[in-house]
Image (cartoon, rainbow, N blue to C red):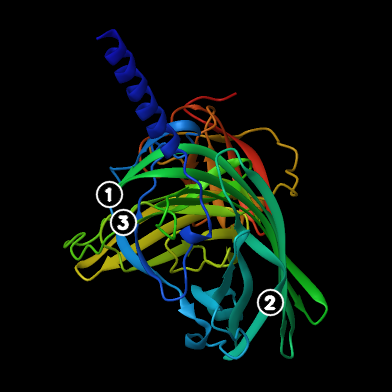
Amino acid sequence: MHHNLKLLFTLSALSLLGYRVAGQITITQADMPSSGDTLRYSNGVFSATLPFDLAGANQIWDFSTLTPSSQDVESYKSSLQTPYAFFFFGLNKYGRKIADTLGFSTFQFTDVYNFYKKSNSAYEVEGIGLRYLGVPLPAYYTEKDKLYQFPLQYNDRDSSGFKFTINLPSLGSYSQVGYRINEAEGWGTVTTPFGTFNCLKIKSSIFSADSLNISGFPIKFNRRIVEYKWLANGQKIPVLEITGNLIGGNFAATSVRYRDIPRSNTLTSPPVAAFSANPVSADVFQPVSFQNNSSGNLLQYQWTFSPSLGLGYENGTSDTSKNPVVSFSQPGLYTVKLRAGNFFGTDEETKTNYLVINDPTSSAPQISKPEQIYGFQNMAFSAPDWLQNCHALQLISPEGKIRSANLHEHNLATPGMPLPAGIYVLRAIHGRTAWHKKILAGNFRE
């Protein structure tokens, strides 16, 4: 009897050990997409409460609460089915459209494809194709972008560079150079609405610079992107992927997506528009990432900024992107509106004076003796010369809070509740210059 119990204990221990070892999967080229694959995924809404940064051995990642807002399909096509067939020619050449449009202003590229190659050692991007003014412009990477290096196991870490250049007819060139760091920082199980999988969690940090050389004048855009990916055997694309920008050392998510089945009725009602930005106070030309938190089966988006001059969309985004990245060349207060629509209706969210864009290079004049203002409800005073023709006004309270301010017929007024007594700072912005003056509000004199 004692012998049988010992044998039973040994078998149970081996069974448990076998289960735990089975959880530590290895990713190989067999787990990557092939030509002809069509892989469906759902887009979800990011929440800071999601355990996206959890790492280590034998973890449990629970994303079962994700709600699909829309769906799409990644289609991996033979090169013969793409606009760049005669350049990426061969049975083992296949590509995927990564963007309908890329670029900004008049420098818009369309039909942007990545072309892939997989082997026992790596899965990599070997070429890119895009159209400029309707002309197909393909190019091979001079340094291939190694998305994954095999075999890929827990605690593996690798890095690689990538580089390509495309000549633009009668214009100049477009190039990209950078490097990728992959870290297999965790293993365990991940649960999404699609199911539960043994997985390997990969953190990819991508640092790149996109350059346009126009008639000898270079324009450069730097990007710092972080991707968290949960890979499972046989799923071809990550069962879950969270992507974002690294801004000031902080991660700002721009997309959440996961492998899924067709869901014909994710929502049959109009969407509810919602968004946030990071940061909400930035310097001129500093990228601001917008997180679209709208709910519903969304088909289209429209972003509007007021004032609209001096806007620049970055990282291939535009005013119709789900999560645009925007920079501002002019300081001031910006009102942001998001319009979201689907087959069942539309909805809008507007945040007035939501963004504060500063110019750190401008120097404020010396603050003079406070202007004196009397009354609380409709405080007003004759505007001095330095206040004329400004395009944005801020009234900063003694606690540092920003209140809106308006200039009506050369008089300053604050809408809403009466203004508490105290010394305020009035900030007037004109072009790339800001002026600051102290304002004394209340029924008293100095």
Q: Position of residue 285 (x, y in %)?
A: 66, 57
Residue for badge 1: 193
Q: Position of residue 70 (x, y in %)?
A: 31, 62
Specify whether residue 102 is in view.
yes
- Whether tag 3 and tag 2 are in contact, CB under 8 A, the answer is no
Tell me if 57 is positioned left or right of 207 in this view: left
Q: Which quadrant is home to the N terminus? A: top left
Residue named by callout 2: 140
Q: Earlier in the sequence, mark 3 or mark 2?
A: 2
CA–CA distance in space, label 3 to label 1? 23 Å
- Image quadrant of residue 370? top right
* Residue 273: mark in rendering: 3
Label 1: which secondary element: loop
Q: Amino acid at mark 1?
A: Pro
Tell me if 400 is positioned left or right of 164 in this view.
left
What amino acid is at disc 2? Tyr
**Label 2 crowd bin: few (<14), some (14–19), many (20+), radius 10 Å:** some
Q: Is residue 40 above or below residue 114?
A: above
- Residue 62 location (% of width, % of height): 34, 38
Q: Residue furthest right?
A: 216
Give amino acid for label 3: Ala
- Tell me which residue sits at (22%, 71%) in the image: 343
User: In this view of the protein, which residue sits in the foreground, 90 or 419?
Assistant: 90
Residue under the image location 47 percent in, 34 percent down: 54
| Of marks 3 and 2, the one in the foreground | 2
Q: Residues within 10 Å of mark 3 (few under 14, many from 20)?
A: many
Q: Is residue 222 left or right of residue 250?
A: right
Give the image location of residue 145, x and y in percent. 65, 63
State which quadrant residue 124 falls in: bottom right
